[in-house]
Amino acid sequence: MTRMTGGRALVEMLQRHGVDTLFVLPGVQNDGLFVALHDYGGDIRVIHTRHEQGAAYMAMGYSKSTGKVGAYAVVPGPGFLNTTAALSTAWATNAKVLALSGQIVQNMIGRGIGMLHELPDQLAIMRGLTKWAARIEHPTQVQHNVDEAFRQLNTGRPRPVGLELPMDVLTTTADVTLTDPNTNYEAIAPEPDRIEQAAQLLGAAQKPLIFIGSGADDAGLELLAVAEMLQAPVVAASSGKGVISDKHYLSMHYPAGNRLWVDADVVLAVGTRLQRPLTQWGVDNKLKIIRVDVDPVELGRIRPPTVGIISDARLALAALRDALPKHNGARASREAELRALREEFDDEFAAITPQYEFLQVIREVLPDNGLLVDEVTQVGYASAYMYPVYHPRSLINSGYQGTLGYGFATALGVKVAHPNDPVVAVSGDGGFMYNVQELATAVLHQIPLVTVVFADGAFGNVRRMQKDDYGGRFIASNLHNPDFVKLAETFGAKGLRATSAKELRDAIRIGLDQKGPTLIEVPVGEMSNPWRYMFGARMKTRGG
């Protein structure tokens, strides 16, 4: 038992749970935490940002690219509220984000007196955006609450969690006993009879098909073994790209998956909502669907599966790998067929200009272990299906939340997590300006991220819809931009401009050699519509 403040107890427990980086924006309610970080922070790297949303997005990028917990700390009230877009994005993308929010002194909470940064019910807001949240009410409760937060983060479906930290708890001194936490989190194993049912269906399938999402990130070896036994194409949502390398002939993007869905007889879906196929591609009585998900609610959210398996993806796929041989006959290789299908789509993708050329250049310059962070922009949309990915967690996106402006700050968190791996962020001029202030953070902390801003002077997707769908009724979609090269230079970053794919190639190479951040402006005009291969005319439905 040691006398310590609540702030010190919190810092020590974060260290015991392996937190090595904390993205922060300080303020008076969190003084007790920052004093403890200064005095007892040890190996925790503190990266302070210029806006709370930047801190939360960086924590999300850290988590999504590593599979580990990304943590941030901010003041209550407006500080916490500024992080809620990032929290909702972390929820949508199944990111392990720990939100640490300050709070006013405990005896004033909920009284409506008008204390600095007071909210009517901050904890209720936090609970609405997280998997689990709690208030620490005394330094002696720190270990219990931090342990539970990390248990929630590392069991079941990964999603953000939150801890609320009243300012008097952080500064109060008490006798506290801290012990090393139990971090042997038990994964959910599948029920053997469900595995047997799935193996029978898959073994008898004529045209099996596999869909994956980020829930399969850590199950690549087991997944590939099952896919090769079945000669089943593996269709990855953008969040699951790279679990099976796109160099492997069984790896398929969603447009090809749409084509294959039409004739599939058994679909194995692992760690994915399967939202688009189930709601847009059609399901008939001939199609048998096997769902593997750690979240039991997800299995039947849209449509009850033929076989539902509640399990960790790796354990379920390992069990399927072992159960399949007695049900699965010899299968001819589908390599020639599937490579031809990929080539057919590649030829069509080449007409989506200039996105295709830009993404080809980025893939060419980045080594296999390089990471790309997209944005809600024309190049980002296209990356979901035409950018090859070779490792899991190396294409980062905002999932179904479609969070405009998340990309730059998120990419900074990715780069902090991967100091030795090249990281490139792509953004439009609209989205980039949401977090432009974090250029100062990147320079201050020497985060060598390469960011490419495609500048068309508009919210491009909005403008396209106004043109194509509403007869040219343009309103509130034009933008006034700075000179992005000069802007970067005023912050102390490297500023470059590229007017072609070749110049972009050279600029990225220069940027990757810098010790600090690089911003590359690429002036562009109207781009080709990238949506046709996701929701448009190319989509096929069963029986249609």
Image (tube, rainbow, N blue to C red):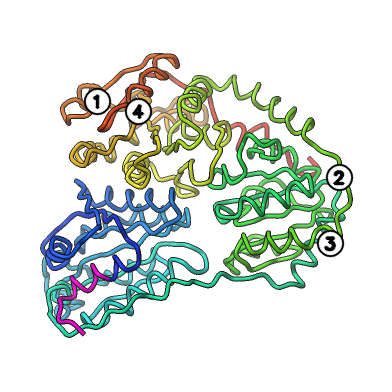
Label 4 Cα neighbours within 10 Å, binned few <14 / some 14-19 / many ≥20: many
Label 2 Cα neighbours within 10 Å, binned few <14 / some 14-19 / many ≥20: few
Q: Secondary structure at mark 3?
A: helix
Q: CA distance from mark 3 to mark 4?
A: 50 Å
Q: CA distance from mark 1 to mark 3?
A: 58 Å
Residues 195 and 239: in front is 195
Q: Are marks 3 and 2 in contact (CB under 8 Å)?
A: no
Q: CA distance from mark 4 to mark 2?
A: 45 Å
Q: Mark 1 against mark 4, which lies toward the viewer?
A: 4
- Percent of width and height locating residue 29: 14, 66
- Would you identify the image quadrant in which residue 493 lies? top left
Q: Kindly identify the amino acid type of the residue bearing the numbered disc 4.
A: Leu
- Percent of width and height locating residue 28: 10, 63
Q: Secondary structure at mark 2?
A: loop
Q: Residue at x 64, y 51 (%)?
A: 221
Q: Kindly identify the amino acid type of the residue bearing the numbered disc 2.
A: Arg
Q: Kindly identify the amino acid type of the residue bearing the numbered disc 1.
A: Lys
Magenta segment: 1-12
Circle 4 residue: 512
Q: Secondary structure at mark 1?
A: strand
Q: CA distance from mark 1 to mark 4?
A: 11 Å
Q: Kindly identify the amino acid type of the residue bearing the numbered disc 3.
A: Gln
- The earlier-in-sequence mark between 4 and 2 is 2
- Would you identify the image quadrant in which residue 458 lies? top left
Magenta segment includes 2: yes
- The earlier-in-sequence mark between 3 and 4 is 3
Circle 1 residue: 494
Q: Residue at x 16, y 73 (%)?
A: 170
Instruction: Say whether residue 400 is left or right of residue 542.
Output: left
